[in-house]
Amino acid sequence: MTARIALPDGGPALGTGVAIARQGLIVTCRHVLEAGGLDVRAPEPPQVEVFFPAVDHYPAFSRRAAVVAYAADKDDDLVCLKAAAPLPSGRVAVLGDAATSEWNEFISYGYRRLGKYHGLFAQGTIMGEIEAPEGHSLLKEPIQLRSSDIAEGMSGAPVLDRKRNLVVGMVSEKWGSDGAAEDRDTAWAVNAHLVTFPPFSLVIRDDPLPMLHAEPPHMNEDLLRRALPPTSDRLDDAPAPLAEWVGREPLLAEADRVAEDPETLVLSLVGFGGEGKTSIARQWIERRRKVWRELERAKEAVERPRVFWWSFAERPGADDFLEAALDFVSGGCISAEDCGDGRARAETVASLLHTRPCLFVLDGLEAVQEQRGDQYGTVLSPDLRDFLTFFATPGHSSFCLITSRAPVVDLIAFVTHRQIDVPSLTAAAGRELLSLLGVRGSDAALERVAQQWGGHALTLSLIAAYLVKRYGGDVRRVGTLPKPDPDLPRGALVRRILSQYDECLSDTERNLLTGFSVFRTPVEEDALETVLTREIPSADPALVCAYTTALVHLVDTRVIRRDQGGRLGLHPLVRDYYYQRAVDGWDQTRLHEWAKNYYLRIADSRSGLPSTLEDLAPLVEAVHHACRSGAYAEAYTLITDWLYAGDRGLITRELNAYDMVLACFADFFPRGDFRREPHTVSGDPGVRGWALHEVATSLQMLGRLWEAVGPLRKAESAFRALGRYHQAAVSCQNRTELHLALGQLTQAEEAIGEAFDLAARAGDQEDVLVAETLRGALLHHRGQHEEAERSFTSALALARQFTPVPILYSRSGVYYAEHLRATGRAGAAQKAHEANLTVCRRAGWAADEALCLIGLGDLALDRANAASDTDRTAALHEATERFKAAYDIARGITRREVLIASLLARCRLAMATGQSAGARGDADQALAMALSGGYRIAEVEARIALTRVYRDVEDEEAAWDEISRATETAREIGYRRGEDAALSLEGSLGEGS
């Protein structure tokens, strides 16, 4: 609903606006336009460009808009614009009366700048309606707000009442005085009630708008019966509680209140790096555990929650996290292999949350969040995103605490999620921290240091370490540091302090920190011995003693941190600083080589072959360090021999850990960018082709189709250059499948031509067969049934002549059966699906088995729609069984397109049995997955399904919105079958109205 208002033709941004009606109405503050030199009273209404960012299911788009209304004789700071075209209903705000919003919390999103970011969230409290300011004549009283986030650029941003789920105002002003500190968070908003007066004359809502809950997880009852509740906390990865704890009591108390609210299940602590979010989370956990122990001693009947701590800064893989979480909540009774893909693991973990209360801490979530663009703050892994939304589903008594530098935008819309911004330390708290860390001086002097450096916890800790180390803690010597620049980012300020601190370190201490910097996860002390003893003569005990003493000092000053399990590590900002300084005697190549050997020794010391992601963890780190040291051949061997375990496919087919596969291969690519060329030994084209193919496969399995096309094209080129035409043909066939799913039908046609050429070069008739079926599928999508028939007939002839199974099977058989059904040959389609189903089951091709079951279910639905009551009941029962079996399979495999197809099949069944309202959730989920993965064909089908749902529940506006977008998308990509279906459905909507 939020949009950026800018001058036309690429002009500068002026402020923020809010869409308030599907007919194209958008409101913003009048002063926003006037600041851009636009006169709302001009005879020719001024125009602006209104940009809506991509969000949820909706792509980004722009509209030209002109002024259509404002309060001509009053001072109300509001103007109404009208866009040249209608707006999607899902992008339109629901306005409400602010009178009953007093003291409710609000959230907002507007176009204020903060460094490289130009669209940011805000939150605060709605204080209530107040009198008009002196000298102003208003139609409606303004609203007073309290928020520390509102700044220039947010004028016109919505004030969304979190409790009532209504936009009750538009941000207009922020108190700009540098004087009274008590007013620094005061802001005002235009009252949304203003739009009910002429010349706007719109209707607003009085009663609250119900908020949506998250999607409930699908439960596997057989697995749930095997599980046992966790019996102990998992805190080995958590930092040790701080002895120096200051100034966070109000924040901890607020976290307590949120956790004790039965309607809140997830809390996010959001703040800049180095503000102390991890320490706050750790302290809060200890605070909760103390309460639980007291209740146990009092013998009060309370079930103590078990704590699970995970640091994404150390282990960012979603697969790794879900395996550990699954082991924890199931009491070690369910393994990752039992659950199929990552989504199934996420569902199983979420399903077990009700067996015993758990407290999950997800620390450093920003490591797996988008850090730029319109998708800033979205969780990158679809499986992890699913887990968070499952956790946000009511029905359990567990709680999740998240720390992140970015807002968790995937959860903002949920009533079960709350966000608390982590502020800087107050001057008093900063003074206390400096004093506890050994800085000496007057209270006023210590408070001045805290204020000058912005109350940033990490910076103050480093200043204390510097002053204590060099000047015995004398605060008067703080002037030897460079003066703080308030315009510098936090990270730059930390680096300036570190450069001064580094100058007063001994060579031993500096070497210790440099050695630590190579490790991206906390390590045992023996890891440092591995690195440091390379530079220390073994017979020199004095140097070994010096390193031991240096380590104790650096831990005491909190520059090096020890976690609950005794492992040692650095804050990411400190680690990055020393890693960049690793030159000359401590060059990065040698550091990585030593670290690689350390992890290989850990892997060798473990008994038995690796079989879980936990077992593979040291090997994954060894791959990382091998690549960073330039040993790409060794890294390649580690992946093929250990992570893949040869043809066994341990990390892929068995563990379905495609997220971890991508993380490993990312080190082969410059800056982890899969669009660039991978590093290989002497540019070996065979290794290059294989690596690119595996990257593309992993991206496809994770539903990231757009990103998979480029690597597949490069893999195909590499195999072609080697003369491996069959492998090139397979890559080309896979790329064609991607183009079809993405709705890139023109590119699919070109790829099919290349597939025929490669098949001819390979001399492989099965490659020709696959190319024919792909061409048949393309023509089928385009509605060219006669031409499709010829392609499928040719493919059948090849199958009978050159394959041991004289039918079209696997995905080829699915395409053929769909064509038969579409051309009115239901009996032949039934036989084709049944024969293919038998082959797929014998071969263990679960994805194709599910698609066959969906096809058979659709044929049963066709019979039900044309049958008498008795036959209809039998046909519906068959369709139900087929679709259920397909859905169960789809939940257990890593194929997003199959899950989308099974969800849409459930929608069709629900509508055929008069349960359209219940199909909304499946249709919404299918559409969300289609949009996030770029499945354009599936997007059209999902929008058609949603149109039918809305039609049946008599939501005419939403139905027209969805069918219009379905028709537009189908026409855009040339999907004729989808366009015909959408137009037919559109005709039925017209008849109904």
Image (cartoon, rainbow, N blue to C red):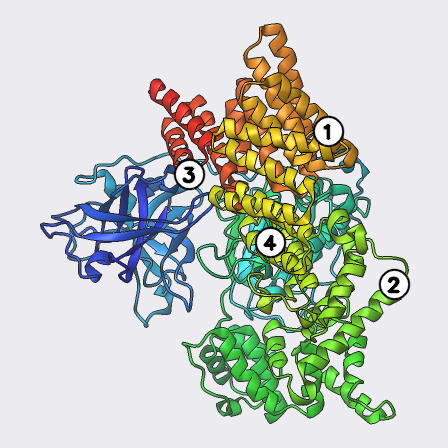
Q: CA distance from mark 2 to mark 3?
A: 54 Å
Name the N-terminal-most of marks 1 and 2. Answer: 2
For the residues carrying marks 2 and 3, which lies nearer the camera in this image? 3
Q: Amino acid at mark 2?
A: Arg
Q: CA distance from mark 4 to mark 1?
A: 30 Å
Q: Are marks 2 and 3 in contact (CB under 8 Å)?
A: no
Among the 4 quarters of the image, the one containing residue 827: top right
For the residues carrying marks 1 and 3, which lies nearer the camera in this image? 1
Q: Give the labeled residue for mark 2.
A: 606
Q: Give the labeled residue for mark 3.
A: 969
Q: Give the labeled residue for mark 1.
A: 806
Q: CA distance from mark 1 to mark 2?
A: 49 Å
Q: Position of residue 808 (x, y in %)?
A: 67, 31
Question: Which element type, helix, strand or loop, lies under badge 3?
Answer: helix
Name the N-terminal-most of marks 4 and 1. Answer: 4
Among the 4 quarters of the image, the one containing residue 665: bottom right
Q: Give the labeled residue for mark 4.
A: 712
Residue at 75% across, 53% down: 651
Name the N-terminal-most of marks 4 and 2. Answer: 2
Using the image as rendered, state which of residue 171 and residue 582 is in the foreground. Answer: 582
Q: Amino acid at mark 3?
A: Thr
Q: Are marks 4 and 3 in contact (CB under 8 Å)?
A: no
Q: Position of residue 828 (x, y in %)?
A: 63, 19
The C terminus sits in image quarter: top left
| Side of 392 where 149 appears, left or right | left
Q: Are marks 1 and 3 in contact (CB under 8 Å)?
A: no
Q: Are marks 4 and 2 in contact (CB under 8 Å)?
A: no
* Mark 1 neighbour class, 10 Å CA radius: few under 14, some 14 to 19, many 20 or more: few
Using the image as rendered, state which of residue 168 and residue 687 is in the foreground. Answer: 687
Q: Amino acid at mark 4?
A: Leu
